[in-house]
Amino acid sequence: MAVKSDLLRQKQGLSEEFSYDEVDGIPSSGVSKWNELSDEERLRANASAFHSLHCFLGIVLKEQREDLTPEDGEFHEALLSLLAQVETLAESTKQLLLMFGHVPPSNGISSPEQDLTYFKKKLRGYKVLLELSTWALRATRDFTKLQKQSTRITSTMAAPAMRSASRQKNQKKRGGYGR
C-alpha cells in the first residue's frame, strides 16, 4: 500500500502526540481475541472492513482534492491507486468467503459524517490510512494461514490418490492386474 498514514499525517500537519483512537464509522482493527475467531469470522471481518475502508477512502480522496490538498495531484494519484487496491482486497476477500462456502457480510456502512471541519477531515483521512495499514497486515496473515491450510488439505487429499496411481503403475510394469 503506497500511501502511508505517516505521509498523510505530515501533509496535514497532524501531531504525533495527539490521540487518534476513535473516528466514527471507521472499522477498528483493535480486536484483542483475533486468533480465537474462526476462519470464517476473520474473513467476514476482513471483507466488511475492506468494504468500509474503500468507501471511507473514496471520501478522503474527494476531501483531499476539493478542500485539503487541491494542488497535490501526485498525492491524489497515490490515493486513487490505493483506492483501487482496497477495492481489489474487498472483492478478493468476498470471493474467498464464497469459495469456502461462506456467506459474505452485507456491505452496509453507517453514513459518514458530512460537513466536517478541516481538522476533522484531516483526522478522518489519517485514521482511515492507519486502520487500513493494520487491516492489510492482518489480512495478509489470515490469507497466508488459509493458504497453508489449503495446501495441507490438498496434500492430504492428494497423497492417497498418488499412492494408488503409483501402485497401478507398478502393477502394470509387473504384468498388470491379476495375471
Image: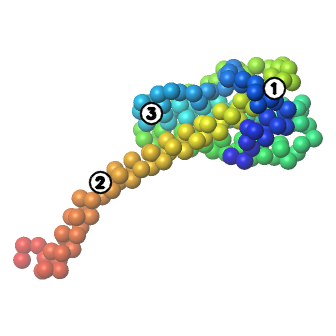
Q: Secondary structure at mark 2?
A: helix
Q: Position of residue 80 (x, y in %)?
A: 77, 43
Q: Secondary structure at mark 3?
A: helix
Q: Position of residue 34 (x, y in %)?
A: 48, 31
The residue to which callout 1 is attached is: 121
Q: Secondary structure at mark 1?
A: helix
Q: CA distance from mark 1 to mark 3?
A: 33 Å
Circle 3 packing at 10 Å, graded few (<14), some (14-19), many (20+), is: few
* Of labels 1 and 3, the one closer to you: 3
Q: Is residue 134 visible?
A: yes
Camera-side residue of 109 and 72? 72
Q: Are marks 3 and 2 in contact (CB under 8 Å)?
A: no
Q: Earlier in the sequence, mark 3 or mark 2?
A: 3
| Disc marking residue 35 | 3
Q: Is residue 124 visible?
A: no
Amino acid under disc 1: Lys
* Of labels 2 and 1, the one closer to you: 1
Q: Quadrant of residue 108?
A: top right
Q: Are marks 1 and 3 in contact (CB under 8 Å)?
A: no
Q: Residue at x 61, y 27 (%)?
A: 28
Circle 1 packing at 10 Å, graded few (<14), some (14-19), many (20+), is: many
Amino acid under disc 3: Asn
The residue to which callout 2 is attached is: 156
